[in-house]
Image (spheres, grey):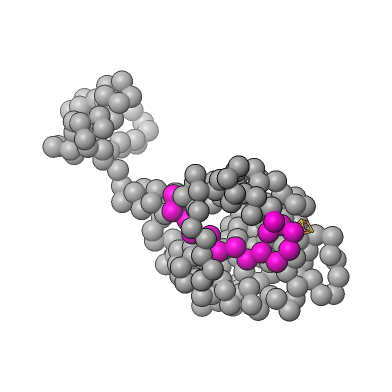
Amino acid sequence: MQSFSKQFNCKLPTQTQNTKKMSTTAIDINPAYEPEGITGQGFFATSLDKAVGLARANSLWPLPFATSCCGIEFMATMAAHYDLARFGSERLSFSPRQADLLMVMGTISKKMGPILRQVYEQMAEPKWVLCMGACASSGGIFDTYSVLQGIDKIIPVDVYIPGCPPRPEQVLDGILQIQELAKNESRRRRESPEYKALLAEYGIE
Ligand code: SF4
């Protein structure tokens, strides 16, 4: 792989030039330069956060928590025509401990709520939640005493997919949104006070 300047056909200023430029401008811009020796073919400098994010985003292992018709749409997404494997998510996990993406698809009854929450709690960090369809997001057409009116009442949700049922293209789009979150997430986020406060809102430690 070529260096940044060669790859994008642009000239980066040398550090001396940059120092001069900095003194004449009011904006405090401090760009990072290729470290000495880390240039030329076969090298590309990046941050550890970005490398880890890239690996996480392209190897999501979904746990399909499918309780009704939305699950059928998910099966279509997994099959040859839409082929979720193209996004590195072909390995479904039916064990929470080997999954990092909880996909909730279908009507969740109040009786089912504690089970869903237990599955979420058993998943290791980092983990993301994708909520597919009107039923999982808000109870959908089932505005009744027995149906949970949205899974975000019991667990935090990262991405919602609207529709009844959503098309497989929407499911793919939801996965891409999760990938963006995973790519750009700092490795320290899960230890941050904000994240702990979010879990505390749900009574999860
Ligand atoms: S959102 Fe529609 S398709 Fe999905 S589970 Fe509910 S009723 Fe079925």
- Residue 151 at x, y = what percent? 68, 66
For the point 69% across and 75% down, which residue is it? 113
Furthest residue to the front? 80
Quadrant assignment, res 81: top right
- Residue 122 at x, y = what percent? 51, 75
**84 versus 187 height, above or below:** above
Give the extent of the magenta segment: 58-72
For the point 31% across and 47% down, which residue is it? 47
**160 versus 151 height, above or below:** above
Quarter of the image that includes the N terminus: top left
Instruction: Say if the magenta span includes residue 53.
Output: no
Quadrant assignment, res 190: bottom left
For the point 46% across and 50% down, which residue is it? 88
Compared across the picture, whether 32 is left or right of 99 comes to: left
Residue 37 seen in the figure: yes
- Residue 121 at x, y = what percent? 54, 75
Q: Quadrant of ligand 1?
A: bottom right
Q: Which is nearer the eye, 94 or 200? A: 94
For the point 60% across and 63% down, which residue is it? 64
Residue 174 seen in the figure: no
Quadrant assignment, res 80: top right
Instruction: Say if the magenta span includes residue 61.
Output: yes
Furthest residue to the left? 37
Compared across the picture, whether 31 is left or right of 72 comes to: left
Number of marks in the rendered image: 0
- Residue 162 at x, y = what percent? 72, 50
**123 versus 130 height, above or below:** below
Q: Which is nearer the eye, 39 or 198? A: 39
